[in-house]
Image (spheres, rainbow, N blue to C red):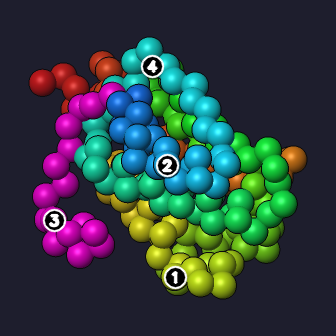
Amino acid sequence: VIRQIFQNNQNTKKICNLNQVITDTLSIVTNDLAKHHIICKTQLVDDASVDINSSEIQQVLLNLFKNSIEAFNTSNNNQREIVLRLESDEARIILFFQDNGPGIPPEMCPAIFDLLKSKKTNGSGIGLWLSKFLIERNQARIRHEATPRGGATFILEFENALNHSNPRNLM
C-alpha cells in the first residue's frame, strides 16, 4: 500500500460523500471490531460532500481503527466503544474519531504524527505519520485531542465541496 501511495503521482480526487467512505470502511473492520468486543457508533450528517481521494481517506480510517483496536488490547476496559461523528457547516465537514481506550500518554502527544515515533512496543511509527501525509495531500487537516475521561480523539477536517464560495467549485 505504501509503495502504491508514493508511486501514484496523480492524486485522483473527486467529490464523494464522506458518509459512504465511513460506511465502506466499517464494512471492512466490522469483523475485527466484533472479535475484540468493540461497539462502533456513527453519527452522520445528511450531506458530507468532500473533494478527496476516497481510497486514501479510507486508508487513514483503517489506520485509526487499527490503532484503537490495539490500544483496547492493552486495557481492561469492558465497555469498548468507538464513535465516528460528522459535523458540517457551509465551509467544513469535520469527522471526530473517538475511542474510550487508554488514550495517548501526554508526553507522546506532541510527536504522534512524527515519522518513526510510537508508544507501542511493536509499533513502526509509520501509521499516524502516513495518515497525516494522506490527509494533507487531500487538502484536509488532522489533529489529536486528549479526551478528559480517557481515550483518544482524532479530528479530521475537510473542506465542504458544496461550499460555493470556494473558487474550485465554480466550474
Amino acid type assigned to the residue bearing label 2 in the image: Asn
Q: CA distance from mark 2 to mark 3?
A: 30 Å
Percent of width and height locating residue 67: 58, 62
Element on which disc 2 rests? helix
The answer to whether any part of residue 39 appears in the image is: yes
The residue carrying mark 2 is: 31
147 or 68, nearer to the observer: 68
Which of discs 1 and 4 lies nearer the camera? The answer is 1
Q: CA distance from mark 1 to mark 4?
A: 38 Å
Residue 7's image quarter? Answer: bottom left
Mark 1 lies on a secondary structure that is loop
Dot 2, how many residues are within 10 Å of its Cα: few (below 14), some (14-19), or many (20+)?
few
Circle on res. 124:
1
Q: In the rendered structure, which disc, 3 or 1, sits on the residue that comes first in sequence?
A: 3
Placement of 39 over or under 126, stated as above or below: above
> In the rendering, at what x and y percent does residue 163 appear?
35, 22
The extreme front residue here reads: 35
Q: Which residue is mark 4?
A: 90
Quarter the N terminus occupies: bottom left
Residue 108 among magenta residues = no
The local secondary structure at tag 4 comes to loop
